[in-house]
Amino acid sequence: MRAPSSPHVSLPVMYHRWSRMTFIHWRYRPEQVRALLPAQVTVETFDGAAWVGLTPFLMRGVRVPGVPELPWLSTFPETNVRTYVRDARGRTGVWFFSLDAGRLPAALGGRVGYRLPYFWSDMSVDARNGRTRYRCRRRYPGPGGARCDAEVETGLPLAERERDELAYFLTARYRLFSLVAGRLAAAQVEHPPWPLHHASLCGLDQDLVQAAGLPAPEGRPVLHASPGVPVRVGMWSR
């Protein structure tokens, strides 16, 4: 299969590089996820299930147009809890239950400037010998203490025949949704296709998914890893 095409964001409001990304996904019953979504979107399913993703990674090169990268502020860990939805026009995209960031200015900017449920957390990403260790302890806003400790071993790149419909459903996402002043807003995200690798969990201790209001995940998760992609984020449009 060929990856869905990325849109072109002609006027980006943010530049990022999403690095050392791990996608950890579980199946959920659609009604469990639907109960946490606003009325303006519906759950997008695959193989009869809603999918919830836990995605730890390292943000690099974060900046706005016309401003250079700042050594301390432009690089920090992030971990998201997300699912996949459609709007009334049938457009697909990501709905975030939470976004934990390792820099307070980034968390505040995401909440105030981009209307996303960011949290400031004590976080780290440590990669060596083919393994990546992610650590997250939520600080603000409360209640604090929600956590994610994950250790992931990255394997070989996916062969072309392994890039199936599920892999693209879980990773090839180019639109974000949120509520801005009570109205649904969408923003496009431009990036090249993810270079996906096999991955295996060496350890996982988390309750970020439960902190979002979902039951604890059950069953074996579906994993993908990627060294990362450069990203251009567009402005919200209602």
Image: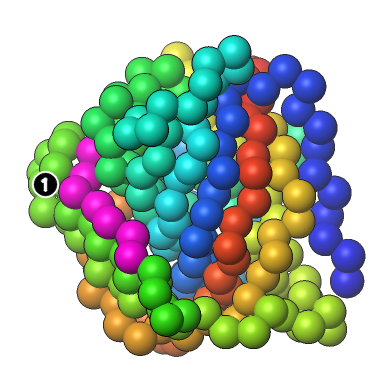
Which quarter of the figure has residue 129?
bottom left
Helix, strand or loop at mark 1: loop
Residue 73 visible within the image: yes
* Percent x, y of residue 42: 60, 47
* Percent x, y of residue 217: 36, 74
* Percent x, y of residue 165: 77, 71
* Kind of residue sitting beneath label 1: Gly
What residue would you read off at disc 1? 144
Residue 179 visible within the image: no
Circle 1 residues within 10 Å: few <14, some 14–19, many ≥20: some
34 and 149: which is toward the camera: 149
Q: Please state the total of marks drawn on the protein image.
A: 1
Instruction: Determine whether 24 is above or below 160 in the image.
Output: above
Magenta: main secondary structure equals strand
Relative to 194, 95 lies left or right = left
Q: Quadrant of the C terminus?
A: top right
Relative to 42, 169 lies left or right = right
Instruction: Determine whether 211 is above or below 61 in the image.
Output: below
127 and 81: which is toward the camera: 127
* Percent x, y of residue 223: 53, 77
Relative to 99, 188 lies left or right = right
Magenta residue span: 119-126
Instruction: Determine whether 185 is above or below 171 in the image.
Output: above
Residue at screen point 63% across, 76% down: 197
Residue 89 lies within the magenta run:
no
Which quarter of the figure has residue 227?
bottom right
Q: How is the image coloured?
A: rainbow
Residue at screen point 48% across, 42% down: 60
Residue at screen point 76% across, 50% down: 192
Residue at screen point 33% across, 34% down: 72
Q: Quadrant of the N terminus?
A: bottom right
